[in-house]
Amino acid sequence: MTEKTIYAFSFLSIAQNNKKLKCERFLDQMDKAVPWDKLTELIRPYFRKATTGRKRKDLETMLRILSLQQWFSLSDPGVEESIYDRNSFQKFLKLDLLCSVVPDETTILKFRHHLEQHNLFKKIFNEINKDLEEKGLIMKRGTIVDATLITAPSSTKNRDKKRDPEMSSTRKSGKWHFGMKAHIGVDSSSGLVHSVSATTAKDHDITQFDNILHGEKKAIFADKGYAETNLKKQCRKDSVFYGILDKAKRGKRLSSSQNKRNRKLSSARAKVEYPFQIIKCQWKYQKVRYRGIQKNLSQLYLLFGLSNLFKVRKTLPLVTYLL
């Protein structure tokens, strides 16, 4: 290799380092938005210090790796390889490959299982929301509820020779879907998720209605799948605004006033679609990664907690400064 070629490579490396990639800008924003210190202190009591053997991996580093998995839809082997391959990941994790060891896929797997066993994903989700509520970003004046289908592998070509028994089939818009449902309750003022639940796909949306309310509601918004006469009477009794879309009865169409009301309410309940758009379209969470409802619910807690931070990532530094 000639001296001129070496200089060309050096110049190219400097030029590349000076350019801020879209991925790096995103990771910089999320690095500032996620309360790493609070989350690390939350989970620290559940991890014992290693007195013998290899030194435990840094908890914040492991949390950052789990976050990368959600944002870029990576498996355990996939995120390990990506850390070695991508400079932006190494910067985000604050790892220098010359003097640091990248956690392998088994370490990442065991860390996630430990969080699942102690129900820490739900606690992480609640801690994120508590931090946002303290900063005045979650108002809890009203709730918008909705559910979405998450598909699961329907093939029986696996070790057990059968599909996941906790998943089921349901029909929507004339098509059959196999998988589970993710149910969320969203703050009507900010559009941030405050409650998460999960069921098998065939369960009706209304079965999780009470589980995804925060108990301080002054208004309820939902699509026509949640419409019930008894619920409407209860809202009137409790002086809660009933913002659930009207549903046509069999053989009878909705009146013009009911259609007008539905159109007006649809714009108010549209905020509930944004968290689904983040995790399914931007972060590519369109199919379950694990078997069983509970394991996937744990991932949903982390996904929606991070989606809340993603939604406020640009305003959060200003709010923190004013506080």
Image: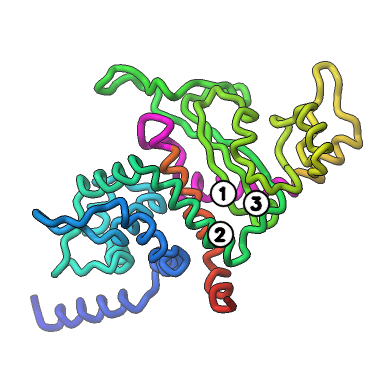
**Mark nearer the viewer, 3 or 2:** 3
Marks 3/2 in contact by CB < 8 Å: the verdict is no
Q: Is residue 56 left or right of residue 120?
A: left
Query: What amino acid is found at the position of numbered circle 1 in the picture?
Result: Pro
The quarter in which the C terminus is drawn is bottom right
Q: Main secondary structure of the magenta part?
A: helix
Could you give the CA–CA distance between mark 3 and mark 2, rounded to whole angstroms? 13 Å
> Magenta stretch?
267-296
The quarter in which the N terminus is drawn is bottom left
Residue 166 % position (x, y): 42, 23
Q: Earlier in the sequence, mark 1 or mark 2?
A: 1
Secondary structure, mark 2, is helix
| Count of numbered tags | 3
Question: Which one is in front, 270 or 173?
Answer: 270
Q: Quadrant of residue 203?
A: top right
Question: Which one is in front, 64 or 10?
Answer: 64
Tell me the residue that label 1 is attached to. Answer: 275
Tell me the residue that label 3 is attached to. Answer: 187
Q: Earlier in the sequence, mark 3 or mark 2?
A: 3
Secondary structure, mark 1, is helix
Q: Is residue 208 above or below residue 185?
A: above
Secondary structure, mark 3, is strand
Residue 18, which numbered label? none
Q: Residue at x 51, y 54 (%)?
A: 307
Tell me the residue that label 2 is attached to. Answer: 311
Please tell me whether residue 245 belongs to the stretch shown in magenta: no
Residue 31 % position (x, y): 41, 67
Residue 295 % position (x, y): 38, 36
Could you give the CA–CA distance between mark 1 and mark 2, rounded to whole angstroms? 8 Å
What is the crowding at mark 3: few (fewer than 14 residues within 10 Å), some, or many (at least 20)? Answer: many
